[in-house]
Image: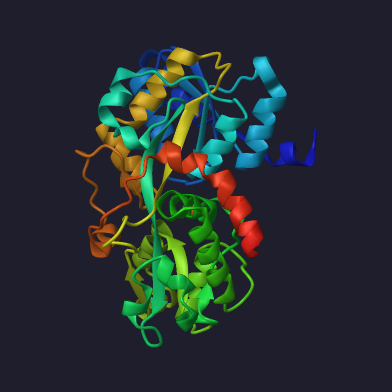
Amino acid sequence: MTHSQKRLRFSFVASVVSALFGVAQVQAQGVLNIYSARHYQTDEALYTDFTKQTGIKINRLDGKEEELVERIKNEGASSPADVLITVDAARLEIADKAGLFQPLKSALLDARIPEALRTPTWAAFSTRARVVVYNKATVNAEWVQTYEDLANPRLKNQICVRSGAHPYNLSLGAAMLAHNGEAKTEEWARGLVANFARAPKGGDPDPLKAVAAGECGVAISNSYYLARLMRSTKPEDQQVVRSLGVVWPNQKTWGTHINVSGAGIAKHAPNRDSAVKFLEYLASDSAQAYFAEGNNEWPVVKSVQVKNPALDTLGPFKPDTLPIGQLAGNTALAQRVYDRAGWR
Ligand code: FE
């Protein structure tokens, strides 16, 4: 067993639930093997609820995206994987390009999920936005109204952001490529790098704290990290939130870049019917609210409402309407552009 395989953990939540409820209530109606790179504690309730509704027992393999993709590749035609769930279009694209998914055919998903949030092989089940955050005491909100603004020399030594190799930033670059073209995106990335306050480090939360501490003036972060801080009862988190201003970028142009949590059915899924049922379940009203709410995201099914004080406070915004499949297809080029621009 390799080191990476050791880090993968099997979870048999559903079987525990079956034991609790007894076989009379939960008839064994098959199994479903989910490989998940989405690590939110609250997702547990989703799996439990699916089993309650369908009697289908879930075996879950949690791991890092790269490990799961590698594993499914190595398992080949005998892979037990039915469903791969992960976050970010850049990662779904890697799995798709590796040929790990089969065509996704479901009239229900077609009806529930907007076309721009589906591809022929995977679908999005929740969305998150990539927002600009600034220190209210040192930065004027007018300076940071667009992603493009962040490359303005006026913001020299102000920007804190995680690595350009991270999927969240690759997807942002992919959107920039679609809207502004390759030359302008590279120029933008160079300008952004020239404005860094420090070398990229950590995840999205680090730059948020660095901005609040005055170490930098501006950060780029996924919306749910901000919502998490807003909902935190820790005084230090509330202090961070008080220092920050938040901008929905590009409201007057192409809209704020959004990304997704998504899933597809594995090419050699031994339990294909259960896999379709599970993805259809994720698009149901209750699962949508739960799936999104569990990580402070927005549901993809338009009619579903979530009651989330942090998301309500952040307010409505105009999202980029670029089809997610087109965005995903640009992520490999985004990496090359960032490499040339020196965004490590
Ligand atoms: Fe994240």
| Visual colour scheme | rainbow
Where is residue 313 shown, x and y percent of the image?
Answer: 25, 64
Residue in view at x 36 percent, y 37 percent: 117
Where is residue 342 shown, x and y percent of the image?
Answer: 65, 64
Q: Quadrant of the N terminus?
A: top right
Residue 192 to residue 18: above or below = below
* Residue 119: quarter of image: top left
Where is residue 41 shown, x and y percent of the image?
Answer: 47, 46
Residue in view at x 43 percent, y 13 percent: 273
Residue in view at x 43 percent, y 56 percent: 180
**Towards the viewer: 138 or 83:** 138
**Towards the viewer: 51 or 265:** 265
Q: Is residue 44 visible?
A: no
Residue in view at x 30 percent, y 40 percent: 300
Q: Is residue 169 left or right of residue 255?
A: right
Residue 172 to residue 16: above or below = below
